[in-house]
Amino acid sequence: MNNEINNNIEVISNQNFDVDYFKEKKINFRIFKDKFFKYSTIAGALFISLLLAYILFYIARQGISSINWNFLTELPKPPGEIGGGVANAIVGTLIMILLASIIAIPVSIAIGVYLSEDKQTKLSYWVRTGLEILQGMPSISIGIVVYVWVVLQMGSFSGLSGGIALAIMMLPVIAKSTEETLKMVPYSLKEASMALGVPYYKTILKVVLPSGLSGILTGILIAVARIAGETAPLLFTSFGNPFMSADVMKPMNSLPLVIFNYASSPYKEWHNLAWGASFLLVLIILILNITAKIISRKWKIKF
Amino acid sequence: MENQVLNIENFSFYYGDSQALKDINLSINKNRVTAIMGPSGCGKTTLIRAINRMHELTENTRTEGSIKLYDENIYELDPIIVRRRIGMVFQKPNPFPTMNIYDNVIAGYNLNGIKLKKSEKDIIVEESLRKSALWGEVKDNLYKKGTFLSGGQQQRLCIARALAMKPEILLLDEPTSALDPKATAHIEELISELKNYVTMLIVTHNMGQAARISNDAVFLYLGELIEHGKTKKLFTTPQDKRTEEYLTGKFG
Amino acid sequence: MRKLFSGDKIYRGILYASAFFLIVLLFGFFITFIFESSESLSKFGFGFITGTQWDPIDSQFGALPFLIGTLITSFLALIISFPLSLMIAVFLSEYFHKGFFHNIIKTAVELLAGIPSIVFGFWGLFVLVPVIRDFQTAIGIEAYGVGIFSSAIVLSIMIIPYTASISREVITMVPSDVKEAAYSLGATKYEVIRRIILPYSGSGIFAGALLALGRALGETMAVTMIIGNSNIMPTSIFSPGNTMASVIANEFTEATDSTYLSALIEIGLLLFIVTAFINLIGKYIIKKTARFS
C-alpha cells in the first residue's frame, strides 16, 4: 500500500505547477461583492419591514379617527349623512366566526386525530392530500361551491352559508395543527394510561388530547385569524346586509364585506367607515395571532 | 528558525466571558505532523479552528496574541486568504452533496472564482486524488456524486479537496472519529505519507493514533499548553505530571 | 393486542367518518364544479379558453382575457417578490439567524401574512394606484392607475411571506458542516450562499415560489379592487384587465341566466384545477427535499 501511494505521487508531481493565487487581483473585488451582497440583503429585508410599517401606520392613521362609540354601536347611515357605524358588520362577523368554529372544530380535530392514529394507510394518504388541496384552494372557489350547495337550496343568501364557507377554510388549518401536536405526545403517555386499564378511546380523549390542548388551541386561533378577514367566500354566501340581523337564515353583513362595499363607493364618509373597519379587522387578527403565539410558547408541552 | 511554518505567540481565546485558551505559545516546523492531544473540552478543536480563523463563523468569540504564518500575522490578513493557505479536514466527512467527485476536488478553485483551463483542472484533480490515495478507486467514477462513497472514501475525498488548494498547512480535526478501524488505518497511513508535501496539525483524542502518526505532540489541559515536544519523548518521558496522568488514562 | 370495547368501536367509527367526510367533501367540490359548468363546457368546449369575447348580453363566453390577465399578474408578482423573499430568507437564516434584527424581520413577515387581502386591496386602491397614475402620466401613457401592473405590485407584497418562510426553512436545513467545508477552502459568505447553499436548497426554494404562485393565481379581493375590471384583452402590463378570480367576484351575483353562471363556474373549475395541481407539486417537492437532508 505504502509503495503504491509513493509511486503515484512521484509520477504526478513531475507535472506540478503553481497556481498564482496570491497575486490575484480579484480578491478585493470578491470582498466587495461579499459586502455588497450582504448590504443589499439587509436593505431588502429592511425595505419590506418599512413597507409593512408604513401600511400598518397608514391603516391606523386613517382608521383610528373613525373608531368611536357610534362606530361600534350604530348602523350605517345613507350616503351624505355624517356618522353611522358598522355594528351590524361586527355582529355578523362574530356570528359567522362562531358558526364556522362550531362546524369546523369537531370535524377537523377528529380528522387530525385520525391522521395521528393511522399514519400510513391509503385513506390517510388521501386525507392528507385532500387537506393540502383544500389549504391551497382559492377562497372564491369555496364561495362558489357553498353557493350551489346552500344558497341555491335555501333560495336565499344567508349567514349560515357564510359560516359554512368559512368553516371549510378553517378545516385544513385545525386538522394539520392537531395532527402535528398529537405526533409530539409521546407513546409512553398512552401506554401509561392503557396500563391502568383505561379504554383506548378514553385514553385519547382524556389523556392525549388534553396534553396537546395548547397546540390545538393555537391551531384554532390561527384558523380564526385566517377567516376573520376573508371576503371572497362571503360575496355570494352571506352577501351583506345594511341592517342589523342576527338571523343566520338571512343575509348577514361582515367587516370585510363592509370594507369591500364602502371602499369602492364614491362617498368620503363611507371610505372613513371602511378605514375604521380595516383597522378594527387588522387589530383583531393581530391580537388573535399574538395570542396564538403566546399560547404556543407559554403552554408548550415539554416531554 | 526558517523551518518554522507557524508561530503561535501568547495566544488566548474567549467564548464570551469564558476563556477557552490561555496564553498558548507554540511553533510548528515544516513537513512534520503535530498531534494535539488532551481530554475533551481542553480546547484542542478551538485551537486549530483559530489557526484558520474558522471560529469567526461562531458569534461572540475573541482572541488575543498572534498566530504567524511565516512572518505574517494571520489576524492581519483577510480570513479568506488565510483559509486558502491553511486547509482543514473535519470530524465528519463533509463532501459537497450537490457536486460530483471531480467538482468536489476542484471546489476550492470554483468557490474562490479562480478560472482554470479544463486541462489544468484535470491535473489538479488527478494529483490531489493520487495524494489522498483515492485515485485508483474513483478514477472511473469521477462524475458520480461524492456522497455515494464509503465514509473512509468520503474523508479521503475531503483531504483531496483540501490538498487541491496546495495549502501550506493542513489542519485535521479528529479526522477518523467517524470512521471504522479499517478506514482509520487507511487515513493514518495516508497522513504519514503526506507529510512530505504539507505540514499537518491533527487533533486527536486517540493516544495510539497520536503515537503512530505524529512527529511532535502537544498536550493541552483546561486551555493551557502543558507540554510540547517530540512524540516519542513526550510519550516515554513526560515532563509534566498532568501529561503523565493523561497518558496513563487518568483523565479518561 | 388491545381489546376492543364498544367505546373504542364508536371512536374508530367517528374517526373514519370524519376522514371519509373530507374525501367526500373534496370529491363533492369537483363534481359540483363539473356539473354546474356542464352547460358552458358543452356549449363552448375548448373555445372557452381560446375565445377572446366575453359578452354576457350576446351569451358569448371566451375566457382568454382572464387567463392572460391571471398569468401576467401572477408571474409579474412572482418576479417582483422572488428576489425580496430570497433576501429575507437569507437574512434570517445566514446573516441574522437570531437576535433583535432577526425577530423584527421575522415578525414583520408574519404580520404581512396576516393582513387580509381586502385591506391590501383598499390600501392599494387609495395609496398605490394614485402613485402609479402619476407615474403613467409622467411617462406619457394613458393614466388609468388601476390595472395589471398595480395589481401585480400589491400581489407581490402579499405573497412574499410564502416564498420567504419556505425558503428560510430549506436554507436552515443545509448542514453546517457542508458550509464550514466551503469556508475552510477560502470562500466568502456570498460565495458559500451562491455556490453551496442555493444549489443545495434550490428545489425547496422553487417549491416555495410555486406555492406563492398558487396563492397569487387564486387571490381575489385585492386584485378585484385594483385591476380595473375590464373584460377586453390586455394590451400592455399597464392596461386594466381582469383575472379569473376577479371576474367571478365581480359578476357572479349579477349572472342571471344559466349560461352566464355556468361560464363563471367553469372559470372557477379551471382555477380549482390549476391551483390544486400547483400546490400538490410544490408540497411534493418540499417533502422530497425534507427527506433528502
Image: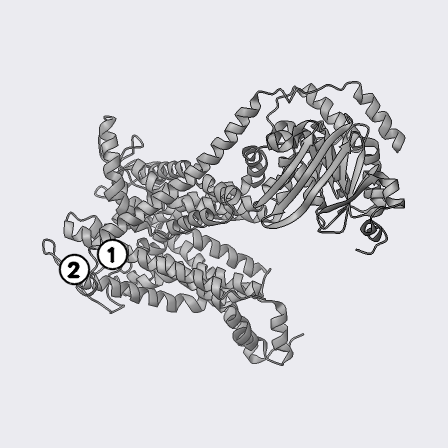
Residue at image point 52% right, 47% down: C169
Query: Which residue is disc 1 drawn over?
Result: A277
Compared to residue C175, the image places residue C114 above or below, namely: below
Query: Which residue is disc 2 drawn over?
Result: A76
Q: Which mark, residue B30?
A: none
B137, A240: nearer the viewer: B137
The amino acid at mark 1 is Ala
Percent across and percent down for residue A96 are 31, 64
Secondary structure at badge 2 equals loop
Q: Chain of mark 2?
A: A
Which picture quadrant has residue A106?
Answer: bottom left
Which picture quadrant has residue B25?
Answer: top right
Percent across and percent down for residue B166 are 72, 27
B13, B209: nearer the viewer: B13
Categorize mark 1 by other alpha carbons within 10 Å: few (<14), some (14-19), many (20+).
Answer: many
The amino acid at mark 2 is Pro
Categorize mark 2 by other alpha carbons within 10 Å: few (<14), some (14-19), many (20+).
Answer: many
Percent across and percent down for residue C51 are 32, 36
Foreground tag (2 vs 1): 1
Choose the circle earlier in sequence order: 2 or 1. 2
Asked if residue A95 lies left or right of residue B183, the reply is left
Q: Chain of mark 1?
A: A
Which picture quadrant has residue C159?
Answer: top left
Percent across and percent down for residue A276 are 23, 55
